[in-house]
Image (cartoon, coloured by chain):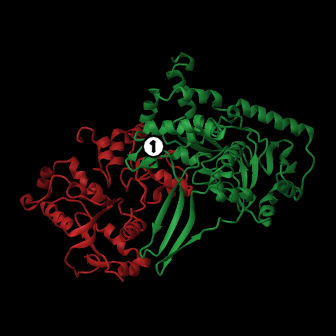
Amino acid sequence: MARRPKLAVWKFTSCDGCQLSLLDLEDELLEIAEAIKISHFTEATRRSQRGPYDLSLVEGSITTPAEREKILQIRRDSRRLVAIGACATAGGIQALRNFADVREYLSVVYANPDTIAALRDSTPISEHVPVDFELRGCPIDKRQLLEVVSAFLADRRPVVSEHSVCVECKRRGVVCVAVLGQPCMGPITHAGCGALCPAYSRGCYGCFGPAEAPNVSALARRWREDGAAPDDVVRMLRTFNAAAPAFRKESDPRGSD
Amino acid sequence: MVDAAALEALPSLLRARGYRVVGPVERGGAIVLDELASWDDLPRGTTVELGPGAYRLRKRPDEALFGYVVGPQSAKTWLHPPAVLEFRAERSRGRVTVVAEPADPSPVALVGLRPCDLAAIRVHDHVLGDGPVADPRYRSHRGAAFLIVVDCAEPAATCFCASMGTGPSATGGFDLALNELLDEDGHRFVIEAATDAGAEVLGALATRPVPLDDEVRVEAAHERARMAMGRRLDPGRARDVLRNAVESPAWSEVGDACLGCANCTMVCPTCFCTTVEDVTDLTGDHAERWRRWDSCFTFQFSRLSSGPVRTSTAARYRHWLRHKLETWHEQFGESGCVGCGRCITWCPVGIDLTEEVARLESATPESGDVA
């Protein structure tokens, strides 16, 4: 058998949930370990091998000067680099700070704010280094992660659709909760979860970030017509993907470019 | 004629003949098509109130079993399913073997289709069933299906089958047709068979001759339904309007309103587009080819090596509407719209194609005026 490709899993500012999706692939773990040499994955083992790596999965956003340096080295050490999860692809929930003044709240929260080295914004990996693929979700879907790894091994494009969650609802026969009267992010949200929330009669929260070419303002207009206050619309858009440009543009028209 | 009580035997009669029985059931706040375990699963005493981007279940004052109109699904889900495994491929010692996946052989009986649904099946018969690119899977599902239509007595605000010439009563294309009557004379159905298979099932039901009064009542119900259509669209006029509206400024207005979410195409009973996805597993020794419903509203649908061709939402909406109402005629000799109104009801922002055609008509000069 040919040399097994080396896999590294990295963490930046994040909750570790996306990395754990790899360990959640319980039925496939042995097969994954056979196909790939896991060289760095601190959630799984403290043994770590040096690069270069064939594939790096990068979780988390860049929020400190140290992280900004570290991602450059990881990129240099990695043949392919895949950003996984809302933090790595859009800045995550912690990007809510991008809408506030970091120095101001550091001074309120910490006794000695001078000891905190924090960047003004929480930013996705792609703002710092070239990224070969972005896998969306908060958290990512483990089947999609398996598809990305399988596609990497076969040297093909991952089959990961960029259309709205609506297509997943309709293929599953899930009744549209938006048309039944609930605010739902589905029409502007990237597919991938398999329409998890609408399948339980709950509007989509937008965990997978903006779909390809989303018309956020048209959906927000509909929410307002249905009685949503401007603050309600902002809160809908400011969750795990608050800083994704398409969502930010609608929730903060002045602050985005 | 068959009494409502006697019709309860229908699901078991169909199952005894090897059919999976699918019909209207209440689930998740709507009347959907799903496995019909028994006649009691039908949404008794329920109706629906529809509008652009709105669907609400309502109680009826009576015990009618089919007192509502179409839901989000249509026969498409069973005859042209949303996801189909086309084939598997296995690699062993450097040799690749392709194993075709046979079509699901279990025939389906669809209970409670509406006349517009039958019209949509006829459209699919022309697109997928015959012609130069017939789809063997569609033909296999379609050939085995048993279709039971119920004529519409109470159309919704989003219905316009009468103007499209596809309803409210079915004229053919079914195995069995039902007309529900519920008054002081009791709960009963006028039932008609149009095929040998339909006649055979009909023969197994306890029927009696239709009184002349009931024939008159059914005719009157059809006439009332024709007058009660919430919307109208003239297919010939729409075709002309769209032919002359290619460069209309009205497209950019609908482009601003349209979410590009693809719901209209997913619920449309005639939209048939699919994509093909090839996947491999970790070892690379097993591959699968899947066919899934796709939509011309997705950005990637028209992707070529240089990128998507229709980059604006306005361009994608125009492509869809023109195909449905104009170029479908050139391609398949009829309109691609059957007037079911699903795309109006299930659009999350309530875009109404009948209104869009009217807007294009008023925003575009008459064809005779164009030099």
Among the chains, which one is green? B
Residue B342 appears at what percent x and percent y? 59, 42
Q: Is residue A238 left or right of residue B152?
A: left
- In the rendered image of the structure, the colour used to display chain A is red
Residue marked by disc 1? B260
Considering the numbered disc 1 on the image, is that residue within a helix, a strand or a loop? Answer: loop
Q: Is residue A218 left or right of residue B325?
A: left
Instruction: Kindly identify the residue that appears in the image at 14 percent across and 58 percent down.
Output: A118
Instruction: Kindly identify the residue that appears in the image at 73 percent across and 47 percent down.
Output: B66
Residue B47 appears at what percent x and percent y? 67, 44
The answer to whether residue A79 shows anywhere in this view is yes
- Please state which of residues B257 and A174 is positioned toward the viewer in this rendering: B257
Query: What's the residue type where badge 1 is placed?
Result: Gly
Q: Is residue B247 left or right of residue B328?
A: left
- Please state which of residues B26 and A42 is positioned toward the viewer in this rendering: A42
The answer to whether residue B232 shows anywhere in this view is no
Q: Is residue A120 positioned above or below B233 on the image?
A: below
Circle 1 chain: B
Q: Is residue B149 positioned above or below B292 on the image?
A: above
Residue B174 appears at what percent x and percent y? 77, 49
- Please state which of residues A123 and B32 is positioned toward the viewer in this rendering: A123
